[in-house]
Image (cartoon, rainbow, N blue to C red):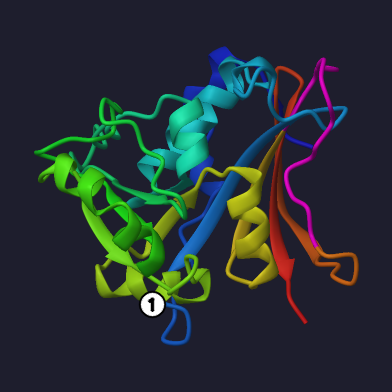
Amino acid sequence: MASYHLEQIDQIDLSEFYPDPKLEPTNTVWIRANFATAANGVVKVDDQSQAVSGPPDRAIFNYLRKQCNAILVGAGTARKENYGVPQPNPDSHARPRLVIVSNSLDIPSNAKFLDREHPPLIVTSAKSYESNNDEIDGFGNLAEFVILGEEKVDLSRVKTLLSSMALTSVLCEGGPNLFSQLLSLKLINELCLTISPKIAGGKPTGIAELPQNLTIEMELGSHLSIDNFQFCRYIPRYE
C-alpha cells in the first residue's frame, strides 16, 4: 500500500493512481465520479461535504478537476455547496465546462456559477423548461440551456450530448441522487472514493441508493493513502 503525508504530495506521480480516460470508438465520453465519505457512511453534514473532507481530499479533488474538461453536478449540490465558475487549469489554462442537471430549474438568480463569460450548461426537461420560461428569460446569457427528455431529464442521453460538445473527460461531483441514476444506467466509468478517517455526526446515507435487484461489482484500480485518508479508484464491472 502506498502511504504518504500531505507534504509529500508533490513527490507523488498522481497520474499513476488516476490515469487518463480510456476513450474508444464505442465510448467517446468517460465519466469519473468523485465522492468523499466518512468511515461510517456519512457524506454530508448540514447539507455540505466539507465536514467529511480534509486537506488531502481537497488536494486530490483539485488534481481531478485539472484532468477533466467538464464538471457534471446536480443542481441541488451546486446550490448547497455554493458552486462558482470552475477555475482554469494552471498548466493548460483551459477551463472545465460546468454542466448542471436540473429537473426543477430551482436555480437562484444570484448563483455564483451564473456567468456571462463562462456560462454553465444547464440540462433540463421540456416540461421544466416550458413551465419556467419567465425565470429562464431572466438569466439572459448567464447560462446555456439544453433539453433532454420530456417529463424529466433523460440521463441516458447525457453522454451523447457531452460527446457532441467535445466534453469527453467528465468529472461527476454528485450529488448521490445524480450518481445513483448514472450508475443505474451504467454510465459511470470510474469511481474515485475518498474514505475519511472520521466518524461523522448525522445519518449515514452513503454515496448511492440503487434498486434492490441491482448490484454492481467493482474492481479496485488503484489505492493511495495520504495522512490516513484512503483514496480508492474503482472500475464498475457492468453485466
Report the residue at 17% width, 35% height from top. 115
Q: Does residue 17 appear in the picture of this structure?
A: no
What kind of residue is marked 1?
Thr
Residue stretch in magenta = 195-210
Question: In the picture shown, does residue 11 fall above or below 173?
Answer: above
SS at circle 1: helix
Q: Is residue 41 magenta?
A: no
Report the residue at 23% width, 35% height from top. 114
Residue 124 position within the rendered picture, expressed as x and y whole percent measured from the top left: 38, 60
Report the residue at 73% width, 34% height from top. 2
Q: Quadrant of the C terminus?
A: bottom right
Residue hosting label 1: 160
Total number of numbered labels?
A: 1
Residue 158 position within the rendered picture, expressed as x and y whole percent measured from the top left: 43, 69
Report the residue at 80% width, 20% height from top. 197
Q: Is residue 168 left or right of residue 119?
A: right
Q: Is residue 233 left or right of residue 107?
A: right
Q: Does residue 156 appear in the picture of this structure?
A: yes
Badge 1: how crowded within 10 Å, few (<14), some, or many (20+)? Answer: some
Q: Is residue 208 magenta?
A: yes
